[in-house]
Amino acid sequence: MVKILVLSKGKNANELSFIIKGATNHYVNSLRRSILEIPILAIDIVEFLKNDSALYDEVIAHRLGLVPLKTDKSFTLPEECNCDGKGCIKCNAALKLSAKGPGTVFSKDLKSKAVEIVYDDIPIVLLEKGQELELIATARVGKAIEHAKFSPGLAWFRAYPIIELNKNKICDECIPNLPENILDFEDKKILLEELSKIKLCKNCSELLKKGKEITLSPSETDFIFTIESWGQIPAKEIFIEACKVLEENLELTSKELEKAK
């Protein structure tokens, strides 16, 4: 049975690190890849009314597409919407931008009644005196398997480190040389919160091979999973939605296999 042990949470709910116990590398990697199928809102179409800046329309449009937008469950994928993908308030959101130089145009200059900008200090373009930028943008819900701008965040995992001590040989001299200070210097106890920080890199392995007081190896069933959200949805919600996506894909695969019999 798979178990989850939370290690740390970010101050703003955009970071989450936890241990997945009793799983396999294939399962955990499938969970990581399922994040790419979470529906996320992002700017997709930009209509330029005026652009006197030094940047081409396409460059500015690309930058706007990467501005994170708050994504709530009221939005749906265009192909699943009642409007049949034609565009409505359930699957699209309109934004406007109008700025004059001199000065830098930031993401906070995007105005909308339907959607909230996550970070208002993202620079878009620099306008000189007399230059203007005016545009209308349309945001829609999409998935990161289609384009990276629909990605909800970054996720990665690594094997949980397994450490074995030879208590008869362990000495005070080797403790300071260990990575991340994983041992308590006084009572020689392994600290769980420090143990999770070990990277299992080549340098660590080589260091521990020199003496046989300590052996370090990767677990095949326990993994440290980390999620960093771009801000559209909280890191915890990313994990929950990824679990739902994986479950739906497994059910779909099971049905297709039944048809093939």
Image (cartoon, helix red, strand yellow):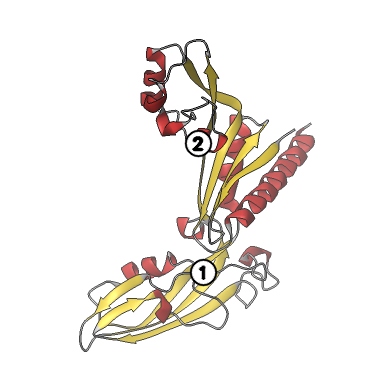
Tell me the element at label 2.
helix
Quarter holding the C terminus? top right
Q: Which residue is mark 1?
A: 69
User: Which is nearer the eye, 18 or 129?
Assistant: 18
Tell me, yes or no, if residue 31 can be seen here: yes
The residue located at (62%, 67%) in the rendering is 78
Counting other residues with Cα less than 10 Å from the Cα at mark 2, is it few (<14), some (14-19), or many (20 or more)?
some
Tell me, yes or no, if residue 57 can be seen here: no
Tell me if label 2 and label 1 are in contact, CB under 8 Å. no
**Would you identify the image quadrant in which residue 77 lies?**
bottom right
Q: Position of residue 211 (x, y in %)?
A: 40, 12
Amino acid on which the number 1 mark rests in the picture: Leu
Q: Is residue 65 above or below residue 48?
A: above
User: Which is nearer the eye, 18 or 194?
Assistant: 194
Q: Which residue is mark 2?
A: 194
Amino acid on which the number 2 mark rests in the picture: Glu
Left or right: residue 123 versus residue 30 is left
The residue located at (51%, 69%) in the rendering is 69
